């Protein structure tokens, strides 16, 4: 079968639904309110809606198998039979086994969860060992291809490619299993060809990071073997999030028919492509439309780049730079945005139109493309902020000696060994969500809303006192999201009404848009924190989100360096820290869970990023006195790659996700001589299971073996907003009791 690829495509599309229909259906299934048949009915409707949307937009090549109930890496694990025995033997249905791997059950903790390259999406880490028996299971890909065909739509099934799948996995040398895994992929391709599939997309983003010669050779071997199959669909190998480097000529050496390159995050791909010489009989899929941000494409500049690619290959198709999974669904419903801003934006639906326009422009010429946008409005500048930043000195990013700080903080706080705390948020109940909705619609006034939030704060404080926690939090009932909350109170930010993006599983976020200079208009958290502190004699943490995370979990302006925007955010947070301290708050937590997430994938680019990222955090936190304790929090990343930066943050206490990884991060901290306070998470809050007392004790003993008890804190992995109060109370009771037991020995 030799079928043309087409002129335009996207690498994927949002799967949650325009109104988060998938989230609601999945959570209803977990709660037992609907059965599997009702869940699948919703899912099938969402899939059909996406395919029809793409067809109606006149997209030439439409992907399928991009839908997922939880995570596409987990879907690929199921497709190749990589289901760990500890889940397979539970005796559950296929769907419930899938969700057990994602969320855990009482008998078994979930697969590890970590960040998907440089995004705020989280994937489930496959577990591969020498005993893993790979088995082809193409049922999902075949079913979705057939569903689309029944609508008269020909699609291209998508899977994570074999090399990236193993690079993402953990176990005893997963990459040693490549030959076995490629054989399983061959069986899947054979089944797809038998069903009449013309093209398959295999994603290999793992190769936009630094890779060894052996890993690059493995990529070449895998696609040489798959390409030499006599009975298979045509193969499109997609890369995204950066430059392929030496992996590009390796792929060009294989018989695959199409290769996708990201020309937004990886402009250097064009130079490597040109160096390869004329590409006969090959389709290059050019990622010209940014799939990871929401700004309109400069179509006239993009078509010039596309024309350059067209001069190098027999056939060029235009694509999104990566899956559109990472942007909201449709801009047309955002009727309240400032018109100047609205005109500069494109969500997934609008990016499809851009891809189609560019594909036509490469074929028919660019005369019909719209003119570039005018310059950014002057009103989006804050000259006073720029003046303050220009006057900064190196000492503005420095605190006193840690040993001195630690002594003064202990004198002020008088905490026991192994102090217990939580990360910040407490359950976001239906009543809290209703109160926020009522405030938005005007059915609840500001005074009534404040009264309800204060009641919830008092409930959270009394609960923590009852449980015996040492350092308390106010629970963040007033916050819809840890980034959006701040974005709504800072100049230079805009909030959407429906701009939801999947973060993991059923968790969706609504990232704010940073469009101009950032400035604090007024204190943002002081009133809530001081009210909570007035209720108790125990210290209550002031809770802020750090500058790097605010950038990472927002859609950020591209007309100035990220470092400049980070410092603007940091200056606003510095002022907030000052006001919290002045109001009597003794502990301030500035969360940076995205520090690793935004780390450039190439080693050569990382020092410059870490320099400004660490500098922004220190600008935010270095204005307080020595006896004010600064905490930070990091979660769900491979921390070993940024461990020296974590140390350089100079926080007094760092709480860090560690339960799913069995405290691995403590070895990394010990290796660099980390000497400040650390709180490795002992409870995986992304799973509904309550950790047994003995399990928490075991985790703590493992931690004490690596970190002196005098520097060790006891806390969950992350905030508790997604959990229910019954789980929270039981788990925190175990946490406090475990700390007391280990403290007493």
Image: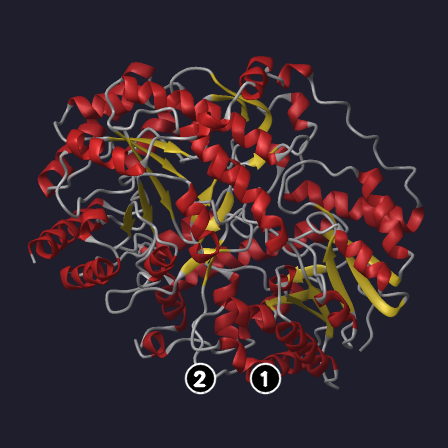
Tell me the SS state at disc 1: helix
Mark 2–mark 1 Cα distance, whole angstroms, equals: 12 Å
Q: Is residue 323 left or right of residue 707?
A: right
Where in the figure is residue 317, as x and y percent of width and height? 81, 57
Which residue bears the numbered disc 1? 179
Instruction: Pick the quarter of the image with the C terminus.
Output: bottom left
Earlier sequence position, callout 2 versus callout 1: 2
Tell me the SS state at disc 2: loop
Q: Is residue 592 left or right of residue 284?
A: left
* Residue depicted at x 25% and y 46%: 724
Along the viewing direction, whichever of 409 and 429 lies nearer the viewer: 409
* Residue depicted at x 37% and y 52%: 27
Counting labels gives: 2
Along the viewing direction, whichever of 550 and 389 lies nearer the viewer: 389
Where in the figure is residue 539, as x and y percent of width and height? 18, 31
Instruction: Pick the quarter of the image with the N terminus.
Output: bottom right
Q: Is residue 689 left or right of residue 524?
A: left
Q: Is residue 330 left or right of residue 392?
A: right
Along the viewing direction, whichever of 400 and 726 lies nearer the viewer: 400
Rendering quarter of residue 664: bottom left
- Name above or below for residue 500 compared with residue 532: below
Q: Can residue 260 be seen?
A: yes
Q: How is the image coloured?
A: secondary structure
Which residue bears the numbered disc 2? 130
Where in the figure is residue 258, as x and y percent of width and height? 77, 67
Where in the figure is residue 176, as x and y percent of width and height? 53, 81
Rendering quarter of residue 513: top right
Along the viewing direction, whichever of 316 and 356 lies nearer the viewer: 316
């Amino acid at each position: 079968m030799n079928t043309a690829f087409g002129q335009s495509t996207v690498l994927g599309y949002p799967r949650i639904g325009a109104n988060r229909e998938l989230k609601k259906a999945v959570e209803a299934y977990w709660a037992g309110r609907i059965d599997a048949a009702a869940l699948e009915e919703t899912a099938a409707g969402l899939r059909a809606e996406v395919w029809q949307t793409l067809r109606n937009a006149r997209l030439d090549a439409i992907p399928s198998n991009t839908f997922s109930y939880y995570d596409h890496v987990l879907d690929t694990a199921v497709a190749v039979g990589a289901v760990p025995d500890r889940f397979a033997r539970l005796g559950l249905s296929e769907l419930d086994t899938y969700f057990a791997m994602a969320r855990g059950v009482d008998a078994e903790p979930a697969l590890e969860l970590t960040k998907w390259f440089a995004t705020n999406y989280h994937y489930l880490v496959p577990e591969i060992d020498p005993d893993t028996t790979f088995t082809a299971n193409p049922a999902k890909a075949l079913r979705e291809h057939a569903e689309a065909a029944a609508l008269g739509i020909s699609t291209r099934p998508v899977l994570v490619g074999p090399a990236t799948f193993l690079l993402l996995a953990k176990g005893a040398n997963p990459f040693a299993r490549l030959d076995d895994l490629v054989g399983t992929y061959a069986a899947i391709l054979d089944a797809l060809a038998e069903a009449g599939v013309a093209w398959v997309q295999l994603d290999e983003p793992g190769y936009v990071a630094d890779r060894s010669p052996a890993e690059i050779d493995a990529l070449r071997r895998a696609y040489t073997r798959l390409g030499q199959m006599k009975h298979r669909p045509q193969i499109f190998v997609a890369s995204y999030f950066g430059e392929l480097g030496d992996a590009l000529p390796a792929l060009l050496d294989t018989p695959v028919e199409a290769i996708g390159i990201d020309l937004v995050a990886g402009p250097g791909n064009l130079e490597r492509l040109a160096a390869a010489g004329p590409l006969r009989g090959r389709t290059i899929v050019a990622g010209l439309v940014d799939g990871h941000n929401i700004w309109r494409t400069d179509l006239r500049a993009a078509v010039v780049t596309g024309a350059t690619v067209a001069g190098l290959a027999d056939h060029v198709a235009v694509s999104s730079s990566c899956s559109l999974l990472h942007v909201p669904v449709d801009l047309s419903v955002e009727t309240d945005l400032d018109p100047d801003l609205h005109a500069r934006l494109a969500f997934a639906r609008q990016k499809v139109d851009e891809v189609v326009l560019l594909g036509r422009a490469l074929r028919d010429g660019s005369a019909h493309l719209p003119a570039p946008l005018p310059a950014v409005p002057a009103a989006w500048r804050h000259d006073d902020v720029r003046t303050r930043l220009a006057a900064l000195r190196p000492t503005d990013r420095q605190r006193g000696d840690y040993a001195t700080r630690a002594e003064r903080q202990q004198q002020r706080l008088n905490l026991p060994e192994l102090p217990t705390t939580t990360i910040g948020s407490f359950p976001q109940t239906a009543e809290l969500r209703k109160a926020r909705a009522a405030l938005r619609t005007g059915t609840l006034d500001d005074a009534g809303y404040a009264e309800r939030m204060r009641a919830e704060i008092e409930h959270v404080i009394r609960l923590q006192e009852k449980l015996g926690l040492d350092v308390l939090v106010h629970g963040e009932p007033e916050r819809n999201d840890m980034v959006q909350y701040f974005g709504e109170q800072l100049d230079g930010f805009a909030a959407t009404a429906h701009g939801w993006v999947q973060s993991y599983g059923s968790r969706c976020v609504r990232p704010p848009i940073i469009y101009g200079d950032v400035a604090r208009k007024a204190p943002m958290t002081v009133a809530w924190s001081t009210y909570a502190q007035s209720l108790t004699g125990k210290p209550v943490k002031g809770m802020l989100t750090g500058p790097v995370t605010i950038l990472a979990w927002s859609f950020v302006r591209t007309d100035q360096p990220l470092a400049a925007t980070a410092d603007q955010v940091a200056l606003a947070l510095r002022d907030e820290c000052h006001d919290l301290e002045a109001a009597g708050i003794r502990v301030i937590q500035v969360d940076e869970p995205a520090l690793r997430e935004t780390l450039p994938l190439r080693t050569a680019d990382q020092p410059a990023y870490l320099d400004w990222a660490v500098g922004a955090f220190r600008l935010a936190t270095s204005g307080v006195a020595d006896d004010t304790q600064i905490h930070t929090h990091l979660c769900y990343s491979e921390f070993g790659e940024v461990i020296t930066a974590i140390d350089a943050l100079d926080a007094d206490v760092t709480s860090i996700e560690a339960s799913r990884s069995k405290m691995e991060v403590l070895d990394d901290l010990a290796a660099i001589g980390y000497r400040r306070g650390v709180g490795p998470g002992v409870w995986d809050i992304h799973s509904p299971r309550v950790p047994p007392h003995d399990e928490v004790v075991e985790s703590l003993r493992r931690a004490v073996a690596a970190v002196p008890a005098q520097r060790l804190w006891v806390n969950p992995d992350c905030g508790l907003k997604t959990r229910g109060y019954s789980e929270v109370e039981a788990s925190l009771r175990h946490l406090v009791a475990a700390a007391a037991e280990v403290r007493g020995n």
